[in-house]
Image: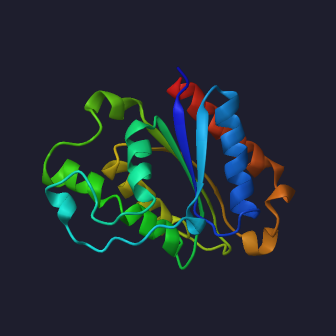
Amino acid sequence: MQKKVVALLGSPVLDGNTARLLDEAIRGAEEAGCEVEKFEVAHMDVLPCMEFFQCMESETCLIQDEMEGIFQKFRELDGLIIATPVMTMGVPGRLKSFIDRFQVFYMAKYHRGRSFISPERREKRKMLFISIAGMNIPNVFLGVKMTARAFGEIIDCPYWDEVLRNDMDTVRDIRTRPEVMEAAYRKGYELGQLLG
């Protein structure tokens, strides 16, 4: 059976540098035999978490939107690829809102002590994180990596590996850095092989 991978594009630019890297990682995962479903998060009709806390006692969210189907996909996935630019030293707002909606998973795991993902499945699930940053400064990826790692723990899909490229204000076009494009493809392929 094909392993299921969810790919999240955090950038609102659908044909930009982040999207190109994500597409290479997807190509790698697909060539390794995975079924990949991509979500362009900035263009989804998803509301932010309103902290109603219904999910403290229930496995559902009070907000009825696209997330209802997404939660099920995240229960079933084997691998996750997140690709995002750094914006104000963190992830873009729409991606952060999307991640925050996983309070449903947080409450199940940490409040009720019954994660949606068994320990055996957690052992096999993996996250690949891809990010670009405009600036060439120390620790520019610290905030986005902390968010990705926390998200991985909440959904029981631990941070496995990464492809990072800073100084994009100088580079401009990621296609002029074939080694980074190749790294994204290679990591996607490795992820697919590990899941298989």
The way the protein has been coloured in the rendering is rainbow
- Measured from the top left, where is residue 64 in percent x and y? 36, 63
* Farthest bottom residue in view: 88
Please give the name of the residue rendered at 28% of the width and 56% of the height, measured from the top-left corner. 104
* Farthest front residue in view: 64
Asked if residue 38 lies left or right of residue 69, the reply is right
Please give the name of the residue rendered at 21% of the width and 48% of the height, measured from the top-left corner. 109
Asked if residue 43 lies left or right of residue 105, the reply is right
- Measured from the top left, where is residue 164 in percent x and y? 63, 56
Number of marks in the rendered image: 0
Please give the name of the residue rendered at 36% of the width and 57% of the height, measured from the top-left corner. 150
Q: Quadrant of residue 171?
A: bottom right
Q: Vertically, is 65 above or below 121? A: below
Q: Is residue 158 visible?
A: no
Q: Is residue 195 visible?
A: yes
- Measured from the top left, where is residue 72 in percent x and y? 39, 44
Q: Closer to the camera, 89 or 105?
A: 105
Q: Quadrant of residue 118?
A: top left
* Farthest right residue in view: 176
- Measured from the top left, where is residue 124 in percent x and y? 41, 30
Asked if residue 11 lies left or right of residue 102, the reply is right
Please give the name of the residue rendered at 52% of the width and 28% of the height, measured from the top-left corner. 3
